[in-house]
Structures are given as C-alpha cells and as structure tokens.
Amino acid sequence: MLGFINLDKPPGRTSREVVDDVAYLVRPAKVGHAGTLDPLATGVLVVAVGAATRLVEYVQRAPKQYRATFQLGRSSPTDDVDGEVTPLDDPPRPSRDELCAAVATFVGEIQQRPPAFSALKVRGRRAYDLARRGQPVELAPRPVTIHSLHVTRYEYPEVDLDISCGGGTYVRAIGRDLAERLGTRAVMSSLVRTAVGPFRLEEAVKLDQLTVDSLPRCLLPPTFALGSLARSEVSPEQIARLANGQSVELAIAPTSNEVAAVDSLGRLMAILEPRASGGWGPSRSFVHCYDDLAQ
C-alpha cells in the first residue's frame, strides 16, 4: 500500500471522516490527506496511503482549482451557508462591471485573514472551537497567492467564480473580502475543488465506489504527486546504497536541491538532496516499501 487516491469527496462529510473510511479499507497502512475541504464542499481530496504520507507536502505545494458560488447581501458567522445566514437590510446590488473590477484586485499575492471558523490554532485551541463558544478569534492576515479569478455567472444575488490559487487560501474568505470591497456581505453556498496539481476531478473516484477490490486500481504511484521534480534513474547497486542511507552520483545535472530517484520501472526509490561530502543522499527513502527490494 503505497501511493495516492484521488477521491471525489461527497457533501456533508468532513475530510477526516472520509480519510477514516479509507483507513478502514487499507488498515494497517497509514493514511493522510493533502488539503482539508469543508463539509459542504465536494471534489478532489487527495488521500495518501502508506509511506506516501511522507510526500503530502508536495501535493500541498501544487496549485488548486475551485468552482464556488456566493450569495451577496447575506452574512453568516462561518462565511458560508453552514452557519446561520442573515439577510442584510437593503444591501447594494453591484453591477457586473463593478463586480469584475473588484475581482481583478484579488489576483496575485494578497493578504488574507483566515475565517474565524477554521482549523487554525489560537492559543493552542482550534479557532472554530473558540468561535463556537462565542469567544473572540483574532487571526492575523497572511500572504496567499491567487493565480486567477474569473466571474463565470452573475445573477444577483448569486455569483459563480472560477479560482486557481496556492496552498493556504480560504475560498470562503475570498467571497467575504470581495463582498466587503463592494460594500456588502456574502456567504459561500457551494464549493467544488476541481483540481489539485495533476489530480483532477474528472479522474477522481467516488467514495462509495472505493472497495477493498477496487482500491489497488485506484492507487496512483507516489511519483504522480511530484509534478515537475527532476528524476534520475538509479542502478540496483545505487538502490542498495540508498537503502543504507549512503550517497550516490547522478547521471543528470539537477537544477534544484531535490531529485526523485527512480528505478528502471519508474518506481520511487528516494527523494535525494545534495550532501556536503559530495553526491546525493536520501532525505526520504522508499526502497524498503517494495517487496522485491526488501532486505
């Protein structure tokens, strides 16, 4: 059990609940996920299985794509319809031109204040735990990257947005801040994550279709998550050295400080980094994950 599952998360379930369902199927292998989705959200949830949990950070670095719907002229403490929604009295109705002009100001690196109802920790507690108790939650703005943001439909009060963004971005907060820029408020009513790097919604498996029998066919190799990371094939002798934490010489001249070492079958043997003593050594080794290579 080594690799990633591209799951289409159903609505009404937390990411943790979905991961627990997968854990039941693959036990005793470890599981983890790359990027939480709110309960109302659907779409791509990347689940790591076995030693692939050590590669989650590579998935988290990948750009994410979303389709989101917001309702203007409404507010809720959670910034979405999962909270108590309150209509505003006589809110402004922005024109499409005003909306598109405001949207354009959110592209690039921006400062974003995370929602009070989030999993971030404040004084050692989850922010949403404090918010549910009615305690004040002060979360400092932090930089996030919005690669692109487009209005795909506007029929007041509903706005549909296509979003491509970097890790750590809260889509709820985009709608909240966009509405404030327009002098009103908004709640998110729908969210679909359509892609996380190479993991795309049209190729995702439904949770109810994932079984002990189908799981091996759904398991993507760990190299799938590594994107454009340089790869270098290593020989059986070099694989033996990597298994013992030793350095090897590479057949390529890498342009970064990380290289994926693969065997002749394309299987991931290790993530390599340069060593001061020369050569490249494993920062993460996966040699022992393969029965035919286990020693």
Image: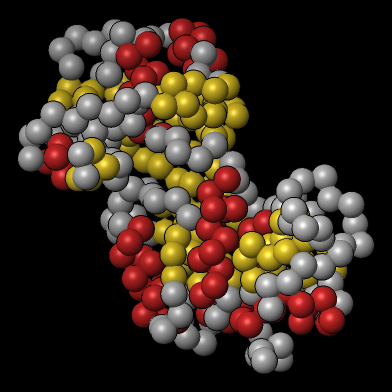
> Where's the N terminus, which quadrant?
bottom right
Say if 218 sits above or below 125 in the image.
below
Q: Position of residue 65 (x, y in %)?
A: 55, 41
**Is residue 251 found left or right of 4 in the rendered image?**
right
Single out the residue that lies furthest toward the right: 251
- Between 36 and 179, the residue placed more toward the observer is 36
- Between 286 and 159, the residue placed more toward the observer is 286
- Between 29 and 215, the residue placed more toward the observer is 29
Q: Count all numbered tags in the image, as a single digit.
A: 0
Asked if one can make out residue 96 in the rendered structure from this viewpoint, the answer is: no
Say if 98 sits above or below 63 in the image.
above
Q: Position of residue 28 (x, y in %)?
A: 41, 84
Q: Residue at x 7, y 40 (%)?
A: 133
> Where's the C terminus, which quadrant?
bottom right
Q: Position of residue 225 (x, y in %)?
A: 64, 58
Q: Residue at x 56, y 68 (%)?
A: 52
Q: Residue at x 36, y 65 (%)?
A: 18
Q: Residue at x 84, y 72 (%)?
A: 234
- Between 9 and 280, the residue placed more toward the observer is 280
Q: Position of residue 115 (x, y in %)?
A: 29, 32
Quarter of the view holding residue 157? top left
**Is residue 228 found left or right of 87 in the rendered image?**
right
Asked if one can make out residue 167 in the rendered structure from this viewpoint, the answer is: yes
**Is residue 125 found left or right of 220 in the rendered image?**
left
